[in-house]
Amino acid sequence: MITRPLDLAARLRPEPRNFDFWFYVNGGLIVLFFLLFGSRFVLAPGLGVDFQMPAMSGARAGAAMTQRVISVRPSGQIFAADGLLSLPQLREWLRGEAAKLKEPSLLVRASAGVPISMIAEIKSAAADAGFVRVVIGAEEPGANPELDR
């Protein structure tokens, strides 16, 4: 060993006492903080990097400011400000949000592979909930060259 010629081992501090119980204390505190201050977005599924909005000419001309936004994936997952929602949960969420706003408007960011029937169902649910305007999001062709490949 390299410490023997210089007798470095004799000059080292002794090994610390056994502090294994601190491991369990730290683990318990981490679990406690996640339970108290955690959110349902920790470890929740999100919009992946493959989320692509459809391209449409004149998309910028038809752009409008909205008060609420939802994102829809081709798998049927619907993401709102409160996290992942099913269609019945979305209907309840839309009613609650429409009641909070004076003239509610909604932006539906649907990925390129979402069936039009699902978009129509969401638009109908928003109209039933009281949303005055529902905007279906799209991108201008050529606006994002990386996605056009």
Image: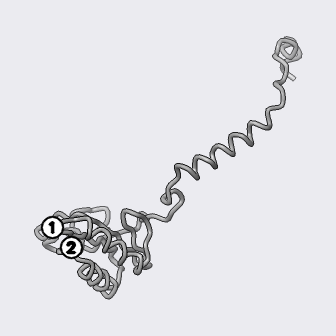
Task: In the rendered view, tell whether residue 12 sits above or below residue 91.
Answer: above
* Residue at 88% from the left image edge and 13% from the top image edge: 10
Tag 2: Cα neighbours inside 10 Å, few (<14), some, or many (≥20)? some
* Residue at 35% from the left image edge and 78% from the top image edge: 91
Mark 1 vs mark 2, foreground winner is 2
Query: Which residue is nearer to you in this view: 123 or 145?
Result: 123
Looking at the rendered image, the quarter that the N terminus falls into is top right
Looking at numbered disc 2 in the image, what kind of residue is underneath it? Answer: Val
Residue 36 percent coordinates (x, y): 55, 50
Looking at numbered disc 1 in the image, what kind of residue is underneath it? Answer: Ala
* Residue at 31% from the left image edge and 62% from the top image edge: 146
Q: Is residue 59 left or right of residue 149?
A: left
Q: Quadrant of residue 130?
A: bottom left
* Residue at disc 2, secondary structure: strand
Residue closest to the far front: 99
Q: Is residue 11 left or right of residue 139?
A: right
Q: Are marks 1 and 2 in contact (CB under 8 Å)?
A: yes
Instruction: Identify the residue under disc 2.
Output: 135
Query: Which residue is nearer to you in this view: 15 or 81?
Result: 81
Task: In the rendered view, tell whether residue 37 sits above or below residue 67.
Answer: above
* Residue at disc 1, secondary structure: loop
Measure the C-alpha gap from mark 1 to mark 2.
8 Å
Task: In the rendered view, tell whether residue 114 sits above or below residue 99.
Answer: below
* Residue at 23% from the left image edge and 80% from the top image edge: 127
Q: Is residue 32 left or right of residue 81?
A: right
Instruction: Identify the residue under disc 1.
Output: 63
